[in-house]
Amino acid sequence: MIDFIRFDYDNSIDLGFQKYVVFGEITKKNIQGCLIYAETTKELREKLRKAKGLVGVISCKEEVNKYAVMRKKVDILLDFPERRLDYVTVKLAKEKDVMIEIALSNLLSVKGIKRAMLVKELRTLFKVIKKFDTPFILTSGAKDFYQLRQKKQIHEVFEYLGADVKRSDYWAERLYRRLFDEKYIMDGLEIL
Amino acid sequence: MRNLPPSLRKRKRYVAFKLISERDVAKEDFVKALWSLMLSLFGEFDGEVFKLIHFENNIGIVACCHRNLNKLKIALTLIDRVGEIRTLPIILGVSGTLKRCRKKYSEVLKDANSTNGI
């Protein structure tokens, strides 16, 4: 299994993940991800030209997220508390095979009314994801060591909020095979 | 209510956990943090009443009703700060009896260090 984090972690504690993808920091011990922050579609288009590897996009604008989903280079829509997704984007993400990240660190970083709003949005998002069977991944999204959590702990929290944990495992496994299994070509096609 | 017949008693679960932090956390601070989180997440009506059975050297056991086990686990997961100390809570496991919980997890913890994952 695979986890997306925002800092370079030295794997000192076994938390149930096989690999970590680091977005936003340079890493040598883990897998390097490419994080793109954009506020306009134009900015995103320009930044995507230079992007390589596993590309993740964060944006607080719905239209930018929608545009990101339609671009071939984008692999993941990364999560942060101000991210806004609409119904159409989630539907498009399924069609374009773009993964949606749902991170636990958001629940840790906000409190009170903001957390209640976030939980409400998460419940709705899980419903829409279930409806379209959109690829999604449950991660820690940790910005530092103390925001890391065990895989089963992350799953328990999101299962309570309505996530289909088994389906998330399937998508995570698929991404892991795409990145590390040389025999894997695409779903249903692999070298024997 | 005390002395309930066995059929009316609630089944218990014992959750063994460990806190990873810069320095040792005080027992009172931990209970306070867990209660405040439980009440803010689930409220007074739906919140789970738990009992801290054991807490020493950042390792502890909490008892709760088996039906609300997931609520306690969620509250434990979402603890990120006890007092002023930042913590990383790790749930080691759940057991149906205290004896088994102590045997299974406390003995393992004697040899624990940061490299063996506990």
Image: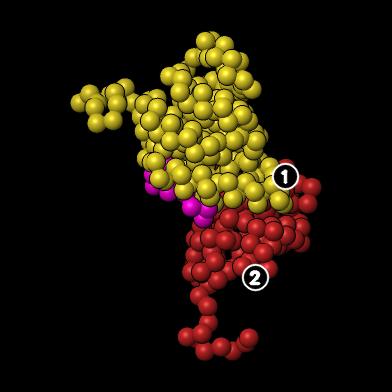
The type of residue carrying mark 1 is Arg
| Dots 1 and 2 on the same chain | yes
Is A84 included in the stretch rendered in magenta? Answer: no
Picture residue at 59% right of the left edge, 89% below the top: B3
Residue A78 position in % (x across, y down): 55, 31
Picture residue at 56% right of the left edge, 39% below the top: A103
Q: Which mark is residue B31?
A: none
- Relative horizontal placement of residue A112, taking residue B12 as reference (left or right): right
Q: What residue would you read off at disc 1?
A: B86
Task: Tell me if residue A131 comes above or below residue B38 in the rendering.
Answer: above
- Residue B88 visible to an observer of this rendering: no
Q: What residue would you read off at disc 2?
A: B45
Range of magenta residues: A159-169
The chain carrying label 2 is B
Residue B2 figure quarter: bottom right
Picture residue at 53% right of the left edge, 53% below the top: A161
Colour for chain A in the figure: yellow
Judge by depth and name the residue closer to the eye, A39 or A185: A39
Residue B16 position in % (x across, y down): 57, 59
- Relative horizontal placement of residue B105, taking residue B32 as reference (left or right): left
Q: Which chain is red?
A: B
Task: Tell me if residue A41 comes above or below residue B84 in the rendering.
Answer: above
Judge by depth and name the residue closer to the eye, A53 or A146: A53
| Secondary structure that dominates the magenta span | helix
